[in-house]
Image (tube, rainbow, N blue to C red):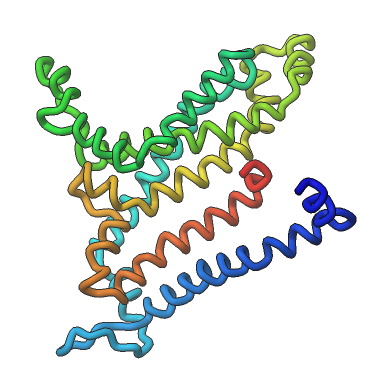
Amino acid sequence: MGRTLAGLFHGRPRLQLGALLAGPVGWLVVGYLGSLAVLLVASFWSLGETTQAVQQTYSLDNFKELLDNDVYRTITLRTVGIAALVTVTDALLALPLAFFMAKVARGRTKGLLVVAVLMPLWSSYLVKVYAWRTILSEDGPLNWVLNPIGLSGPSGNAAVWLVMAYIWLPYMIIPIYAGLERIPDSLLSASEDLGAHPWTTVKRVIWPLVFPAIVAGSIFTFSLTLGDFIAVSLVSKNQFIGTVVYANFTTNPPFAAAFAVVPIVIMIIYLLIARRLGAFEHV
């Protein structure tokens, strides 16, 4: 068996491996890009005025509705704002933890911290969301603590922000940890030997080198929050892009497709900016 595999990749390993992966990757590209193409085409369709059946005639009515209606503009701004807030929150939480993991912890401690960060990813997404729904409910444990002192747990947009920040935090920690691991310890020692203050080292040495990794992590946290509809519908009654698309999927598919194009356009712009900042080197 070992000789067979060795002979398969002998001489031109990259070419052989590329030939093996061409088929699966090709079908993946066709399926993914094909579904996006169907989505884009469907966004220009409309419903018949009398039959309410999908009319495969092209118009910009759905996009005009999104631009002219204040409700949908508010929903879009709310979704983008929460996604940005979750990204900033996760970055602030991830930076010190990732730095401790990469530059302070040693041996078994580092391994345990890495496992602790990855462990939430092994549990079901729905289990975590329902757990937070229970925690944030009126009779939940959080209100047991806050109600006696005249406070109440977060709800609405605050609840979405808290739940999303918790769920996507590992996706921010891992790229930053990988970016910090690439910074040689000798570089930090040289800065210290030259008399630089610790905050100067952070500002002049660590931050420029780790910033692309932060942007790489933000791609995950921002995009995953932008397109989520399950968690936001379970912990909040406020409308977001995902919940509106889901609600219109069966009643008005062309409008749902048009609204689904909005986060795609936002992410394309975001990815172009991230590419210029060098984030793809850390994804």
Q: Quarter-wise, where is residue 249 in the image?
A: bottom left
Residue 228 as seen in the image, left or right of residue 91 = left
Q: Is residue 239 above or below residue 136?
A: below
Q: Is residue 134 above or below residue 227?
A: above
Q: Quadrant of the C terminus?
A: top right
Q: Is residue 227 above or below residue 56?
A: above
Residue 48 as seen in the image, left or right of residue 196 = left
Q: Nearer the viewer, residue 2 or 263?
A: 2
Q: Nearer the viewer, residue 145 or 202?
A: 145
Residue 121 as seen in the image, left or right of residue 195 = left
Q: Quarter-wise, where is residue 102 in the image?
A: top right
- x then y, percent, for residue 278: 67, 46
Q: Is residue 45 above or below residue 68?
A: below
- x then y, percent, for residue 12: 86, 58
Residue located farthest toward the front when viewing the structure as drawn: 1
Q: How many marks?
A: 0
Q: Quarter-wise, where is residue 128 in the image?
A: top left
- x then y, percent, for residue 160: 28, 41
Residue placed at 45% from the left, 46% from the top? 222
Residue 10 as seen in the image, left or right of residue 182 = right
Q: Nearer the viewer, residue 124 or 34?
A: 124
Q: Nearer the viewer, residue 10 or 99?
A: 10
Residue placed at 43% from the left, 35% from the top? 122
Residue located farthest toward the right when viewing the structure as drawn: 11
- x then y, percent, for residue 23: 64, 68
Residue placed at 15% from the left, 27% from the top? 140
